[in-house]
Amino acid sequence: MGCEDSNTLEYSKTLGVSTTPIPGFLRVDLTVHGDNRGWFKENWQRAKMVELGVPDFGPVQNNISFNDEAGVTRGIHAEPWDKFISVATGRVFGAWVDLREGPSFGAVYTCEIDPSVAVYVPRGVGNAYQTLEPNTAYSYLVNAHWSPKAEYTFLNLADETVAIDWPIPLDHAILSDKDKLHPRMAEVTPFPTGKQRVLVTGSNGQLGRELMKQLPAAGFEVTGAGHVDLDITDAAAVQAFDWSGINIIVNAGAWTDVDGAETDEGRKKAWACNAVGPANLARVANQYGLTLVHISTDYVFDGTQSPHSEDEALSPLGVYGQSKAAGDMAVTSATRHYLVRTSWVIGDGNNFVRTMAGLAARGISPKVVNDQIGRLTFTEDLAAGIIHLLSTKPDYGTYNLTNEGEAMSWADVAKLVFTGTGHDATQVTGISSAEYFAGKVAAPRPLNSCLDLTKLEATGWLPKPTIQRLHQYLKA
């Protein structure tokens, strides 16, 4: 299927975007303004074109192909990046074949391109171009830097199954020796549709380790980055990082020493990790069209509302909460973001449940605060909930994510841990926060950390009950 050819450049067409038989491949009609001096056009206009449906694909390189003669024919090449193709001078006949694995494999679209027509070509769709006039130049924006390591998929220009009707027969056209040797369709290995590629920052933490385990099992390609691999607080390092192979960032790193954040040194580290780092990631997410997932906390609230909804005004009490709130605000500047707000995280590492189990095992009777209430969040479910958002792609924005169940105090949790490990729950003594922190340098804490899960559950994901997960965790 193709569009009608025309030798006359059409001026003042309305900018428009239309679909084609190849999924994701778009034809763009451009507005060209002309008079006796020549013509002018907006070749790529991000705001207008994105509004009409062209993906905001984040081009990073602009290439121009100049051809002296009519009949120069190149292709059919499927590259591992997206492209926006347009003509500067002359005319070309374009032919595209879907070489991606899947039901549309082999679908064909042909179209003549002059300065008033452009096309958006998704990665994995094979492209070929034949110049129809001498001195033809066409340009293409791509969203990955060219690399000699890039893997292409090829199809022979003369393949009988796609049967492209070349305006200039191939035996009269100008072809490279390499293009003549490309395989027929029966020999083509389909271009892999590609797993989403995820970078997990803070990959050595409790949640990071769980994400590194669950993401590959859910069909994602995942790369972990600890502080040594990528210092997100360093804007220059974040900009210099190679983002060309990444689709999604999950920022699981944070400064979580709540009391330490109240010290002179800790305050600087908390703000760098929790506010500056997310701002740097939001900047590159917008720059390269990436999805940013950021983990937030109940500490951005003062604990006076119950439960806390996603749209509640931020009201942090201490430095830690203030730095996380600043990070939240920075993350919302990313066009594609999921801000996941959670509380009382328990996973593979040092945490409250492990501490209580250790005290029980050593016969120590702890005093635990009984006026701070909330819900535990097990990293198994936190990671699964994040993957649910990435897989089902509900509207971008903020989502609360904890385990389900009745709110409990820290003392209640401690008693369940003692009971679950075969010890006497009466060994746990509940005391007020004021009593517990008397005489200590400590950050203020929200007394109510319960998060409203209605929005998340409306997407079709139901977190497991807290009690069930706690029992499983203690057995493991």
Image (cartoon, rainbow, N blue to C red):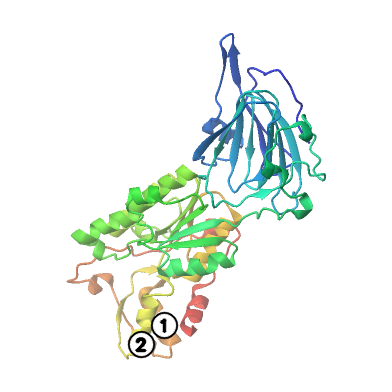
Mark 1: which amino acid?
Val
Q: Do residues under tags 2 and 1 come within 8 Å of each other at their CB atoms?
A: yes
Tell me where residue 313 appears, x and y as whole percent. Answer: 38, 49
Task: State the image quarter where residue 304 is shown.
Answer: bottom left
Whether residue 314 is visible here, answered yes or no, is: no
Residue farthest along the left direction in this orientation: 439
Residue farthest along the top direction in this orientation: 36
The residues bearing labels 2 and 1 have C-alpha atoms spaced at a distance of 8 Å
Residue under pointer 1: 417
Please tell me whether mark 1 sits on a helix, a strand or a loop. helix
Q: Nearer the viewer, residue 35 or 262?
A: 35
Please tell me whether mark 2 sits on a helix, a strand or a loop. helix
Whether residue 360 is visible here, answered yes or no, is: yes
Q: In the rendered view, would you say 43 is above or below 205? A: above
Q: Nearer the viewer, residue 48 or 416?
A: 48
Tell me where residue 410 appears, x and y as whole percent. Answer: 36, 74
Quick one: label 2 or label 1, which is nearer the N terminus? 2
Residue positioned 69% across, 26% down in the render: 70
Quarter holding the N terminus? Answer: top right
Q: Is residue 19 left or right of residue 266?
A: right
Tell me where residue 475 appears, x and y as whole percent. Answer: 49, 84
Q: In the rendered view, would you say 144 is above or below 169? A: below
How many marks the image carries: the answer is 2
Residue under pointer 2: 360
Tell me where residue 421 appears, x and y as whole percent. Answer: 43, 88
Q: Nearer the viewer, residue 249 or 418?
A: 249
Residue positioned 36% across, 89% down in the render: 361
Q: Is residue 113 left or right of residue 320?
A: right
Mark 2: which amino acid?
Ala
Residue positioned 30% across, 59% down in the render: 320
